[in-house]
Amino acid sequence: MSGLASTLVSLGLPSTYEAAVLDYLTPTDIPTKSLRPFLYGFVGICFFAWLLYRTWIYPFLLSPLRVLPEPKGGWPIIGHMHLRVARPVGEAPLKWIKGHPDADLIRLRGFLDSEALCMLGPQAIAEVLVTKNYDFIKPPKAAGFLARVLGNGLVVVEGDVHKFQRKHIQPSFNFRHIKELYPIFWRKSIDVVERIKADLFDGASKTPPGVSELSFWAPKVTLDLIGIAGIGRDFHTVIHNEDELAQTYEKIMEPKFEIFLLFSLTVLGARWAMKILPTNVDRWLTLQTDKLRHLCRQFVVDKKRLMKISGEESADLLSKLIQSNNFSDDELVDQVLTFLAAGHETTSSTFEWATYLLARHPEIQSRLRKEIHEHLPPSISPDSKDIDLGEILESMPILNGVCSETFRLYPTVAQTLRVAARDTSIMGYPVPKDTLIAVPIYAVNRSPKLWGPDSEAFDPSRWIDRDTGKSNNSGGAVGNYSFMTFLHGPRRCIGQEFARAELRALVAAFVGAFEMDLEDENYRPLRMGVVTTKPSKGMPLKLKVVGDWSKAH
Ligand code: HEM
């Protein structure tokens, strides 16, 4: 029964019952006609009793979760709803983490004081994401909306289907395969650098001479990269945008208010309302996603046929999935859509944030450039058998520190949600089925308790071991659950190593070739977006081509 219906029943039934009892007990004194005011009176009394129960008696006197700390600023009736939806995503939980340094778990209240939880510390995180992972699922309505675009790929499926898919997709993302992708990452990174150079002083460019808008180039190069390394198709969007599959995909992903509205109404269970609004975006989305699926299906079928005929082994992820023989054509299409969506915007905005941080820290930028020039000789050829590009990029401490620190400070998925799939518990507190749980990735990554008093400072050296001068994996943080960018447990990001390798190549090629500054040195971008976040007003950079190194390419 919907929340509204159960409310009406719980109000109406007792009231009617009470009115009937009254009528029965005092039949002669109260004529039927005048029963109505009593009925209304009882409805009112029941309503207030119910309201009192929902907003005060249950949450503050009875709920087993009442012992948990709560952030300040809750309002009557709507609880902490206004804080939960506050933008930029993650800022409110960061305040909660700072205000409750010893709490692993806090309680939030929602509409009519329905209860939700927010995990702030390692023990709660470990239980929800790792030890009891399958007790918690993604919110079904949000996952249902995503499935319209992504199909039933790894991001949205649950339970045994997830276990099956994860088991059979994981090998395609293993270290050896990711290493094979480095030459692709490097070639495309150099391509975009060359395009930016050509555009920098081109009179036809939309930016002033010497300035480049990275938020124009970054999504293009990362779409090309996930295209070629993920599914073996070069979209060439850095050069032009004529690939029908890429065009359709980009159309769907374009930020549109109507799509946001459709998503919000779907999550609230009110998709029907789209029918009475003056927009046909729901139908438009269905048409576009059908077209995208059709194009992907055609591509998968052609690719399979070609692989059979040529017998060639290709490095892309889709080829590995085809070779594994575990998925039908339709299931392969679901994964293609999933790779495109999960591996595109996430890496492009991380790349933008990396350049922002470097532009604001010129001394780190110079040290990184020196390291790049020392390790990557101008003559480097990604295809040379004598050079292990992956090993070189992975061994550069400043480069890896800069990338890890960007992932930490600007996780593009700033927050994710879970719902209890059954009655369960976290840290011994009973958690009823359907309780919503916020996983505040951005906030945990900046927690002073876990990262120290300078937790919000950009300091790549925290990822370098002082004694050996080599990269470390912990960033000097406390425990295993301080770095949340890719989550943990069976649902952690499967593309983590792919994303790390891609960012290394992009940052090395870019910083090796350009000295960068913010076009407006006072620009402090906000994080904009809901599912993934990016800089609010793009990333306009003043670029100066670096002499010697750039000539080599
Ligand atoms: C900066 C880059 C990236 C970030 C920050 C990121 C972050 C995340 C996060 C936080 C999740 C978990 C979401 C949740 O369960 O609520 C996730 C899942 C996932 N990511 Fe990534 N991701 C990145 C890049 C990639 C790339 C490049 C790929 C693919 C090539 C990818 C593929 C996936 C897939 C398939 C899942 C679902 C895994 C599962 O549920 O088993 N991601 N990612």
Image (cartoon, rainbow, N blue to C red):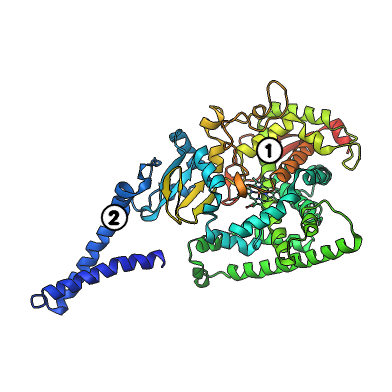
**Who is closer to the viewer here, 515 or 375?**
375
- Residue with the mark numbered 1: 354
**Who is closer to the viewer here, 53 or 75?**
53
Residue drawn 85% across and 31% down? Answer: 547
In the rendered image, residue 239, in percent from the top left (x then y), is placed at: 81, 53
In the rendered image, residue 370, in percent from the top left (x then y), is placed at: 79, 27
In the rendered image, residue 266, in percent from the top left (x then y), is placed at: 52, 63
Residue 439 in the figure: left or right of residue 537: left
Mark 2 crowdedness (10 Å alpha carbons): few <14, some 14-19, many ≥20: some
- Closer to the chain start, of discs 1 and 2, is 2
Residue 372 in the figure: left or right of residue 523: right
- Residue with the mark numbered 2: 53
Q: Could you tell me the amino acid type at mark 2?
A: Tyr
Mark 1 crowdedness (10 Å alpha carbons): few <14, some 14-19, many ≥20: many
Q: In this view of the protein, can residue 502 be seen by the observer? A: yes
Q: Is residue 522 above or below residue 177?
A: above
For residue 337, what is the image quadrant? bottom right
The image quadrant where one finds the C terminus is: top right
The image quadrant where one finds the N terminus is: bottom left
Circle 1 — which element?
Answer: helix
Circle 2 — which element?
Answer: helix
> Distance from label 1 to label 2 (Cα)?
50 Å
Q: In this view of the protein, can residue 210 be seen by the observer? A: no
Q: Which of marks 1 and 2 is in front?
A: 2
Residue drawn 91% across and 36% down? Answer: 386
